[in-house]
Image: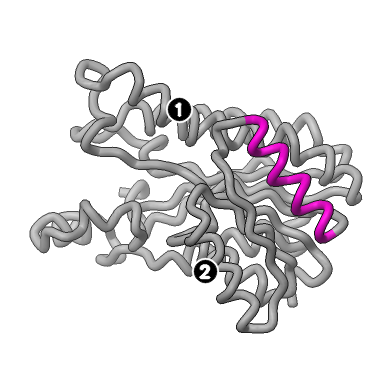
Amino acid sequence: MRLEGKVAFITGAGMGQGREGALLFAKEGASVIVADIDAKAAKETVAMIERRGGQALGVVGDVSKEADVKRLIAAGVKRFRGLHVLYNNAGVLWKDKDKSVLDTKEADWDRVQAINLKGPFLVMKHGVPHLIRSGGGSIINVGSVSALAGFTVAQDSYTSAKGALIALTKSIAIQFARQNVRCNIIHPGIIETPMQAPYLKDPAKRKSFEDGIPLGRIAHPREIAHVALFLASDESSYVTGAEIVADGGFTAQ
């Protein structure tokens, strides 16, 4: 019960890494606001939490739209009467459309930026005041190893959005430290999620990914969720403005 009494708002919680985080947070005592653009997926996550005895509320909207984000957070606060954790997990990875700056269409660049960078901005804009009113809290942003190393196969909008999120994380951490609001960022490597599934179907490509990771395997979403759990809990009360890399040793090479 490491999150007992806390209320957590998790974006992209309908599947993959976000769902694992929602299930784990609820298991550890949090009331979870399950935010997703997919109503069916959000409903399924809520049902899974409730079957296990936890508390959750499904809210549906687009994190890149301010009116949606404001509405989603307000609904969660109204239901659970507080907010202590913001977990900015929602993101998109479009390797077929987000390529080199030479090949990416402007509309595709803008959409990736809107979800991966503007989304966390909006969640923090409308969530931080509630964290302060609750006496403080934790913000967990999801970056990527793509922001830490260059790759021959480019995803330049995704990479730049995640890089900018590092700077925003540090700025938020310093701005609100005296109000007991912490802000940290996790940099996962490749994970077994629906977002990555299309790129892992080919056995040869999968083996190539695995061979490039010192631990020799692709991460399970629960392994990233446990890092997020630490950052959401009071166990990380002296950790803010930090980057935690969970990539099986990839960037240490």
Left or right: 108 in relation to 187: left
Tell me, yes or no, whether the highlighted magenta stretch contains residue 67. Answer: yes
Q: Is residue 2 above or below residue 108?
A: below
Left or right: 229 in relation to 252: right
Secondary structure category for the residue under label 1: helix
Nearest the camera: 175 or 72?
72
Mark 2 sits on what residue?
A: 44
Are circles 2 and 1 on residues that touch, CB within 8 Å?
no
What amino acid is at disc 1? Gln
How far is mark 2 from mark 1, CA to CA?
28 Å
What amino acid is at disc 2? Glu
Q: Which residues are magenta?
A: 66-80
Left or right: 196 in relation to 115: left
Where residue 175 sits: x, y (%)?
A: 78, 30
Q: Residue at x 8, y 59 (%)?
A: 204
Which label sits on residue 122?
Answer: none
Q: Is residue 58 above or below residue 37?
A: below
Q: Residues within 10 Å of mark 2 (few under 14, many from 20)?
A: some
Where residue 188 sits: x, y (%)?
A: 43, 52
Q: Residue at x 82, y 60 (%)?
A: 80
Residue 166 position by quadrant: top right
Which of label 2 and label 1 is nearer to you? 2
Nearest the camera: 166 or 59?
59
Where residue 208 sits: x, y (%)?
A: 14, 55
Where residue 153 sits: x, y (%)?
A: 20, 35
Mark 1 sits on what residue?
A: 113
- Residue furthest toward the bottom? 52
